[in-house]
Image: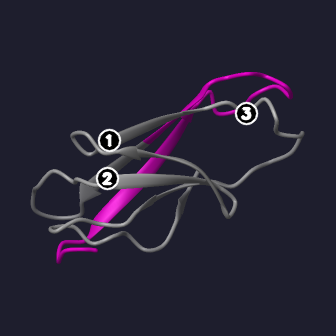
């Protein structure tokens, strides 16, 4: 899927770091916007921890949120990403946007 207008996706986590064993939630907020022109992005954001999908959320007003429970994660850094596949107007951005 994907339209003709380029888009960007940003990802924010709150809190940005957690203590080992913390139940969370960690709120993941992905924001999609057209790089030029207007339009409100629609569709779904897929959230990943590395190559493993951990959830998804529908965009509302260009924003999607997902609450993640990190309690089973071991100590260490993780690559958390949000992927937007585009809609009838907007193209997906270049592959992954990492935090």
Please tell me which of labels 3 and 1 falls first in the chain: 1
Q: Is residue 7 magenta?
A: yes
Q: Earlier in the sequence, mark 2 or mark 1?
A: 2
Please say if the residues under marks 2 and 1 sit with CB atoms less than 8 Å apart.
Answer: yes
> Considering the numbered disc 3 on the image, is that residue within a helix, a strand or a loop?
loop
**Residue 76 in picture, x, y percent from top left:** 86, 45
Would you say 97 lies left or right of 78 here? left
Q: State the image coordinates of residue 37 (x, y, percent, origin top left).
A: 10, 62
Front one among 21 and 5: 21
Specify few, some or many for label 3: CA neighbours under 10 Å numbering under 14, 14-19, or 20 or more.
Answer: some
Q: Is residue 53 left or right of residue 8?
A: right
User: Which portion, as a residue range, is magenta?
Assistant: 1-29
Q: Which mark is residue 63?
A: 1
- Residue at 23%, 64% (x, y): give it: 35
Q: Are marks 3 and 1 in contact (CB under 8 Å)?
A: no
Which numbered dot is residue 32?
2
Residue at image point 16% right, 68% down: 88
Residue 17, position in %: x, y? 71, 32
Judge from the rendering whether residue 82 lies leftward or rightward of residue 78; answer left or right: left
Image quarter (top left, top right, bottom left or bottom right) of the N terminus: bottom left
Q: Position of residue 28 (x, y in %)?
A: 52, 37
Quadrant of residue 39 in the image?
A: bottom left
Furthest-right residue in this view: 75
Residue 17 belongs to magenta span: yes
Q: Mark 3 = which residue?
A: 70
Quarter where residue 48 is shown: bottom right
Q: Does the CB distance between marks 3 and 2 fall below 8 Å?
A: no
Residue occupying the point 89% across, 39% down:
75
Dot 2: what SS?
strand
Determine the CA span between mark 2 and mark 1: 6 Å
Which type of secondary structure does the marked residue at label 1 adopt? strand
């Amino acid at each position: 899927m994907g339209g003709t207008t380029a888009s960007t996706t940003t990802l924010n986590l709150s809190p940005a770091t957690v203590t080992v064993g913390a139940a969370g939630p960690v709120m993941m907020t992905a924001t999609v916007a057209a790089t030029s022109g207007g339009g409100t992005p629609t569709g779904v954001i897929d959230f990943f921890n590395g190559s493993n999908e951990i959830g998804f959320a529908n965009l509302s007003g260009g924003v999607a949120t997902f609450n993640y429970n990190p309690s089973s994660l071991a100590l260490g850094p993780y690559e958390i990403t949000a992927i937007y596949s585009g809609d009838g107007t907007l193209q997906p951005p270049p592959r992954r946007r990492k935090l």
